[in-house]
Amino acid sequence: MQQRSVVACLLVSLFSFIASTEGAPGPRLDNRRLYRFSYSTDFQLDRAQGSRLGATGLKIASTVDINLVWRNPDNEDEQLLRIEISNVQIENGLPRSPKRNIFKGSSAASVLGETKLAALQSPFMVYWKFGKVRNVFSHKGEPITIRNLKRGVASMLMMQLRGGKMFEADVSGKCVVEYKASKDKVTRTKNLDTCKTTETGFTTHSPVLGVTSASSSVTSITLENNFIKSVVAEEMYTLLINVRHAISARIISRQILTLETIEAGPEEVAGKDAVSVVKSLDDRLISVGILAEKIKPGRKDSPTLMEVWQEVKKDLEPANLSKATAPRSFLTLIHSLRKASSADILKVLADCSKSLLPQLVDAVTSAQTPASLDAILEFLDFSKKDGLVLQERFLYACGFASHPTEKMLQTLLDISKGKIGSPDIKESVVIIMGALVRKLCLKGGCELSTVEQVKQLLLEGPDSTQDEAEVQMYLLGLKNSLLPEAIPLLTKYAESETGAFCTISITALQRYDVALISKEVKLALNRVYHQTRRVYEKNVRVVAGDAILGSDPSYMEVKNLLLSIGHLPHEMNKYMVSKVQDILRFEMPASDIVRQVMKDMNSQNYDRFAKVGSSSAYSGYMAKATDVTSTYSLDILYSGSGILRRSIMNIFGQSNDALLHGLQVAIEAQGMESLIAATPDEGEEDLESFAGMSALLFDVQLRPVTFFKGYSDLMSKIFSMSGDPMSVVKGLILLTDHSQVIQLQSGLRASAEVQGGLAIDISGGMEVSLWYRESKTSINNRGALVVTCNVNVDADFASTGMEASFETEAALDFITTVQFSEYPFLVCMQMEKTTFPFREYVTKFERLPQGKQFISRRGRSQLVPGSEFPLHQANSDMCKRIHGEDDW
């Protein structure tokens, strides 16, 4: 009973506050008075770090006359105002030399055109109640840009004479607004993050690759005799590209309304309500509301999709994909594709050469419009095996989609249920569906019908088949999905008798937030590592050990792990010692508990930490900057006979406390001891000969690639090995994709687009020489990256914009050479980046439809020296022995 009374009191207080705010007296206009104001609005557009003098923008100045038309006799705070704009002037937002001033010698009539100027200067009416603009009445058929400018003037009249916080609608949208009032001043602060508008954008799901935005809006109202003396509004929008803050944009918009004179004006008219009065005075006026109307995008002189394709296709030839022109042209093509119809896209696909088709498929899929998806689905035939390359490029582009839709996921689900010509494509479809489920869930779409269907498919898949390849396929899909409800299933398969299932399941569990790793999961990982129930391959055990150390381990978990060192196979001993040392040296999260355990001499002693071997684990920094910190890790495990068992290279990016798994390339081999008449390690006696590679790129697990499987396949590959690497993933990826419409309070509209394009080629190879008793594995990464930030204010009669961008071309190679003619065998690991260019550009422009324009371009470039990333000293000593002192 008491609880109900408290709730009732709170509700009464809330409604009392709302009622008092709604009914609070507002400013009032006097009858037979004309209030003449000077009005100006301007904006400046520049980089966030740029100086104000270097900005671009424009200014509109005018006279604004306001008079009372009608007042409700029963409520003096309910008024109808007539507003007329005159003496319009349009000029640069900042002082500009005559040579750089596109408005020099122009008048408002020449810039706007006679029709638009007449529309802007035609009177309109505002329904004003308690200081709030409830409606705007303007002439039917007015240009939307002009009507929005009128709404911007009307929005300057929004006020209340008491403090409070509420939702309020003006030209910017419906936003949370807070008022603070004193005797002669009112401050109106608008929370722009809460504004709901008719135009919504999208952004990249990854914070590391995304955009950080900040905004503010403050209006200061000065009163005199309970009426407006002046209104000054300033709003600011800042966009920072997380990977490089120097590529940024800032818009500052101001409005100033100042009372100049009060003169004799017309008599107010009688009427029962505002709407009937409006109709009686001017039947051409219609209700248009205060919210800004959407402006149709696009210019009449924009090139067609086919014209854009003819212009950029030479940059997308396979031989040019390592150049920055490739991702830049890729972004240009996507921009055009997003405005194209399905029929136009199909024409370009049909006209494309064979060498360019994979790149065009990347672009069409990355456009992520209904038309582009329809076109690519009509073009591709998944029932045919000969289209594997194009089909997989489509699937990978879906996996990397910046803002996937339920329709895209439904498309993949339909493909999975239909006839698929290649088993590799069937596997990729399921794996990529997992990635889309995760992205849709991150956007709050976990309850969507299609998402629920795919979740059920993935969760029931592993237990629904006896085919090992299909079980692996479903587990990889779950690894991408990161569904919390999949943890028990992954935990079950982590203890499987099949090594591949164990490895996939444990690496999937490693990707979850530590808070989701329960006691049951940790017990399973410890059973695998310590072989409590069965014998496991040592590559499975080291993965379990890594997972234990990375999941907030307890004191006893770490102690038992350290005590196991010395009782493991030789190379596993060395790997675990190296992993513990890496945790301590690199100050990983587990370093504190490891140090605490190592105070016990039973856990740390010379016998445990002086194990001989070539396996290792090492982490380091690739780059440390205020924008993004990039780290790498190289983990390598050998069999007791010197044959590579498992090699993993990881690259991570961290920004704003968010982590991105940028790249993981893993090479695994097994059952190759027979080549050198060596004895397999415990638990690996019956393993089939196998070598393969898998890649995880930008948090998306891709389909693994097999080098060989089975003894006969192994021998044929041994004698036919050319040393040429096998491609794992190759293509164009839309890394960053942010689109935002910024509705300024002045009525002008800004659009911001941030896009990052990457041309990438990841390949790997493995060579074995029985004659020289030497093996070599290589992971080669080639890429070109372009990130652009475009911000435009297109006012129909004048356009202003800025593009800031950077580009680079880089190569990163990881080569491991092993000589197993003696024990301990010699291992040399090399991780090298080549010298690469880095270029930045800033372009600003102002343009009039008549052809006048001003363009400013600035840029700088530098060569970043190549280097070899440091590894441990023992590796350097071995490299000297293998390659010779003079070559190292």
Image (tube, grey):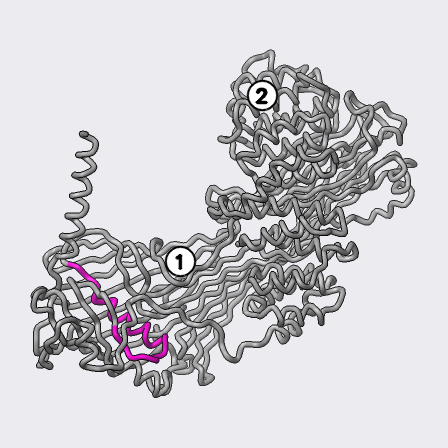
Under circle 2, the secondary element is: helix
Kind of residue sitting beneath label 2? Leu
- Residue mark closest to the camera, 1 vs 2: 2
Do the residues bearing badges 1 and 2 touch, measured as CB atoms within 8 Å? no
Quadrant, the C terminus:
top right
What label sits on residue 523 in the rendered view?
2
Residue 606 or 249: which is nearer the viewer?
Answer: 249
Relative to 392, 755 lies left or right: left
- Tell me residue 2's x, y (percent): 18, 30
Residue 573 or 357: which is nearer the viewer?
Answer: 357
- Tell me residue 768's x, y (percent): 85, 38
Q: Residues within 10 Å of mark 2 (few under 14, many from 20)?
A: some
The residue drawn where x is 40% and y is 58% is: 238
Q: Give the vertical position of 762 relative to 844 (above or below).
A: above
> On the image, which quarter does residue 192 sit in?
bottom left
Q: Give the vertical position of 359 relative to 136 (above or below).
A: above
Relative to 208, 489 lies left or right: right
